[in-house]
Amino acid sequence: MVFEFNRVCFGLKSSPFHALRTVKQLAHDEGPSYPKAKRAIESGLYMDDFVYSVDSVEEATLSTAEVMRLMKSGQFDLVKWTSNSRPVLDTIPLSHRLSAIKEFDDSDTHKVLGLCWSKSPTCLALR
């Protein structure tokens, strides 16, 4: 008798791998339709954080929209978006943006990849 899971069971040691592998497979499968998004996901996805940098606001806007469409094709909704570019942020629905984090020192920092990221002067720091 053979038993097999029909769903991803969270809480297993391998669950983070399965989640990441699923998203990377989606990027591979849908890559021909979304080439910018495929490149972004392949190079910028780290466990449950997506960090991607480009050279221009136009490229960031196009990449962001394409990543959102690619993920939507797999029934995934990426949320908690943030950017150091106001024009890029303006293209992201409010419901998908990272809510402002209020800290006692009034700094504009967010946690990403275990680091503190300050958008004002773009820098990463350890606390």
Image (cartoon, rainbow, N blue to C red):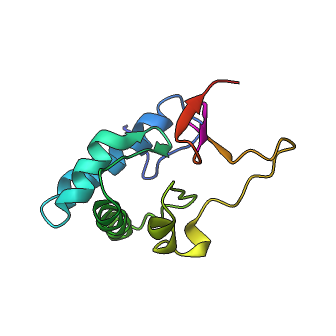
Question: Along the line of sight, which residue is nearer the eye, 5 or 62?
Answer: 62
Outermost front residue? 121
Q: Does the magenta stretch include residue 116?
A: yes
Q: Position of residue 7 (x, y in %)?
A: 46, 52
Which one is in front, 58 or 17?
A: 58
Left or right of 124 in this view: 61:
left
Q: Quadrant of residue 113?
A: top right
Expressed as whole percent of the image width and height from the top left, the position of residue 58 reads: 30, 66
Magenta residue check for 33: no
* Residue drawn at x 27%, y 43% as measured from the top left: 42
Who's the residue at 35% across and 65% down the image?
Answer: 74
Q: Which residue is drawn at 36% across and 42% down?
A: 44
Furthest-left residue in view?
Answer: 32
The residue under the point 53% across, 44% down is 9
Residue 30 lies, in percent from the top left, at 20, 61
Residue 61 can be seen, yes or no: yes
Q: In which quarter of the image is the C terminus?
A: top right
**Residue lying at the far right of the rendered structure:** 104
Q: In which quarter of the image is the N terminus?
A: top left
Residue 27 located left or right of residue 18: left
Q: Which of 27 and 64 is in front in this view?
A: 64
Left or right for 49, reference 94 = left
**Residue 113 appearing in the image:** no
Quadrant in the rendering for residue 2: top left
Part of the protein shown in magenta: 112-118
Residue 10 position within the rendered picture, expressed as x and y whole percent measured from the top left: 56, 43
- Judging depth in this view, the residue of 44 and 22 nearest the camera is 44
Q: How many labels does the image show?
A: 0
Magenta stretch: helix, strand or loop mostly: strand
